[in-house]
Image (cartoon, grey):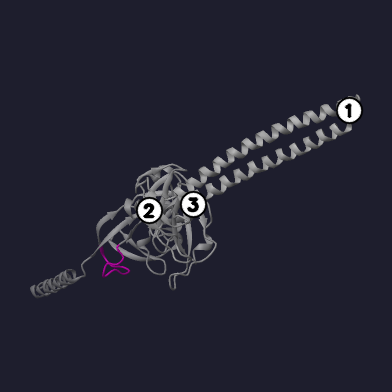
Amino acid sequence: MSSRRWIALALTMSVVIVIALIVWLKRPKPVAVLLTRIDAGAVERTVTNTRAGTLKACRRARLSPSMGGQIANLPVREGDRVKAGQILFEIWNDDLLAQMELAKSELLASQARAKEACAQSEVAQGEAKRQTQLRKKGLTSDERVDQAVGLATARAANCEAASATVKVGESRIAVAQAALDRTRLTAPFDGAVAEVNGELGEYVTPSPVGIPTPPAIDLIDSSCLYVTAPIDEVDAPEIKAGMTARISLDAFGKEYFEGKVRRVAPYVLDVEKQARTVDVEVDFLSEKDNANMLPGYTADVEIILDAHNNALRIPTEALLEDNRVYLYDAADQTISDVPVTVGLTNWQFTEIKSGLEQDQQIVTSIDREGLADGVRVKAEKQEQTD
């Protein structure tokens, strides 16, 4: 081969190499992505509340007196623990106490008169019987027998009337006690005093009809708590009492508590515009979970409608529109746009029915610019599913 041909070949190869180098240097840089490995686990279909729920006490009583008057006794303060039947609040009632004592005294007098009348009746009954027996033997006159029988009848009527007077006295005491009870607020159950509205010596009046006023005593039993949360009307028909749920509270961070649906409201609320909801109540499965919780906390519930265990799953954040994913090929470090068939899904995981296999890797950072079918990528880090 002549030297010219060698020179031409060398120049051609050099040009090819330079062009290849330029193309290689100008090729798009790989997109940095986050990858996750497909695994098997539990996938649930759930619904959650549309607005924040509230932690409530199973028993809460906002107590107010049924009559007005001056506060004469206020033995409790906010935060006190009280027992059922304990007096919490009392309006001045010295006049009613005096009426009660009068009624008790009158009852004692009535009981004494009834005892006397009934004793006289017994004596008269005995005399009438004795006179009747003597008459049979011819030892007394008919007139004396008639007198004894008449007197016994009269004494028996006196006894009956006196006994009725005793019952009237007992009823008067019940009336006086009812009037006295209207001046007192007593604890209907064991609990803690959450709020006290009023001070000794102040005058209180009952709430006018249709105008709510703050309660005199707000009593809460915090030993039993539950969550009430609004669920969108579209999701409500699938929710039934007894379904498993998870409860989360802002005050406890990412900690979750096991719960169970106790009640689904039989009506739809339309208080919020264009957001009709159904209230759902959820109990805590363990009473120990109530420790350190306060009624009024913001709470959310996640109700489990269906669940599949050991299902092939991917993070929901990796799912593209029309049920597609970016599948990573480790051999040439590229991604492929792959369609998949999905099953149950929630905000965390989506079940894969077909299109992927366990241990394959997919892209989770689908919002990165430049991602498309066939694009070269560089794994930024490997994510682990929980």
Which residue is nearer to you in this view: 311 or 331? 311
What percent of the width, then of the height, locates residue 279?
48, 61
| Local crowd size for mark 1, using a 10 Å CA cut-off: few (<14), some (14–19), many (≥20) | some
What percent of the width, then of the height, locates residue 9?
13, 73
Which residue is found at the position 55% from the left and 62% from the top? 266
Q: What's the residue type where badge 3 is placed?
A: Arg
What percent of the width, then of the height, locates residue 339?
41, 66
Q: CA distance from mark 1 to mark 2?
A: 94 Å
Which residue is nearer to you in this view: 370 or 376? 370
Which residue is found at the position 82% from the left and 35% from the top? 147
User: Magenta span has 116?
Assistant: no
On the image, numbered disc 1 is attached to which residue? 135
Q: What's the residue type where badge 1 is placed?
A: Arg
In the image, 204: left or right of 133?
A: left
Which residue is found at the position 71% from the left and 39% from the top? 158
User: In this view of the protein, can residue 310 be seen by the observer?
Assistant: no
Q: Which residues are magenta?
A: 365-377
Whichever of labels 2 and 3 marks the residue nearer the N terminus, that label is 3
Whichever of labels 1 and 2 marks the residue nearer the N terminus, that label is 1
On the image, numbered disc 3 is attached to which residue? 182
User: In this view of the protein, can residue 276 be seen by the observer?
Assistant: yes
